[in-house]
Amino acid sequence: MAGFLMLGKQRMNEDITDIPSLWHQHEIHFLDFEGSLRSGVLEYGLVTIKDLSVVELETRLCRGTGVIPEMETATHQIRKADVVDALPLSESWELFRDLRAIGPFGAHHAGVENGLIKSVWPYMNRCLNFLTGEQDVDWGPWLDTCALYRTLFPDLESYNLSALIQTFGLEGRLNQLAVQHCPESRNTYHCAGYDALASAVLVLQLEEYEELKELTLPQLLQWSQPGNASQAQGDQLELL
């Protein structure tokens, strides 16, 4: 596709911690929350990928911690009656802790998910930072699919999640996976499992580009950090 930014191997190998395996050999966990700091998390979706396949999708409704504004309900279709008997997100600490310990989290506009998860659990247990190779207690670094696509494809009109799926012709793949993994009543945009699956599909489709398939996990994480797009354009070596 015109505008694809090929990150030269010399540049990609500079100042990157050596974790000796390719990104698709790791478990990566794509996360989406429905809700807000006002209402609390009302639904989460977690999609794990490894070896270029979806391994598992975990999703459920959560009891919020505040009032659910009608404006929010108009988007995600979740009402107080839907979650009044659900467990709050805080009851899923072990799930999130264990997944983050074995692989990084990813999300589209990851700052939103990072803020919401920290509103419940400010810190993670000490674990590996998959970008630096050091131990820390942060939920990141995140694989932000919005930032990643801005870096790799700098000339697109929109980096909205649904727009990217449409631009790259991924609707069929996404919907096929949604039928397999999402609850029947929550299998469209603004449903946490579906949106997490869409983020995962955006990363899975990178296998179509030989140079990107050869990236290590730290390299993929580096180029998905917000603010890297302008830097990457300055380091551009080749366009496809």
Image: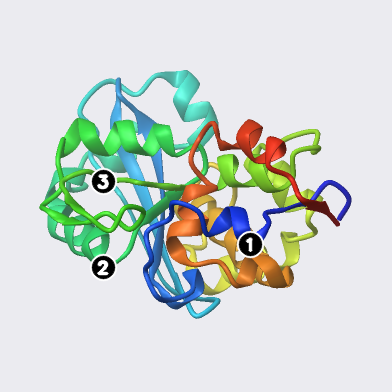
Q: Which quadrant is home to the N terminus? A: bottom right
Location of residue 229 in the rendering, given as x and y in whole percent from the top left corner: 63, 36
Secondary structure under the numbered disc 3 in the rendered image? loop
Classify mark 2: residues with Cα within 10 Å, few (<14), some (14-19) or many (20+): some
Residue 230 visible in this rendered orientation of the protein:
yes
Kind of residue at badge 3: Trp
Q: Give the mark nearer the N terminus: 3 vs 2.
A: 2
Kind of residue at badge 2: Ile
Name the residue located 52 percent from the left edge and 59 percent from the top edge.
Answer: 13
Secondary structure under the numbered disc 1 in the rendered image? helix
Secondary structure under the numbered disc 2 in the rendered image? helix
Give the total number of marks visible in the rendering. Answer: 3
Circles 3, 1 touching at the beta carbon (< 8 Å): no
Q: CA distance from mark 1 to mark 2?
A: 27 Å
Residue 144 visible in this rendered orientation of the protein:
no
Location of residue 44 in the rendering, given as x and y in whole percent from the top left corner: 35, 49
Q: Give the mark nearer the N terminus: 1 vs 2.
A: 1
Q: Which quadrant is home to the C terminus? A: bottom right
Residue under numbered circle 2: 102
238 versus 74 height, above or below: below
Name the residue located 57 percent from the left edge and 40 percent from the top edge.
Answer: 147
Residue under numbered circle 3: 139
Residue under numbered circle 1: 9
Name the residue located 20 percent from the left edge and 28 percent from the top edge.
Answer: 65
Kind of residue at badge 1: Lys
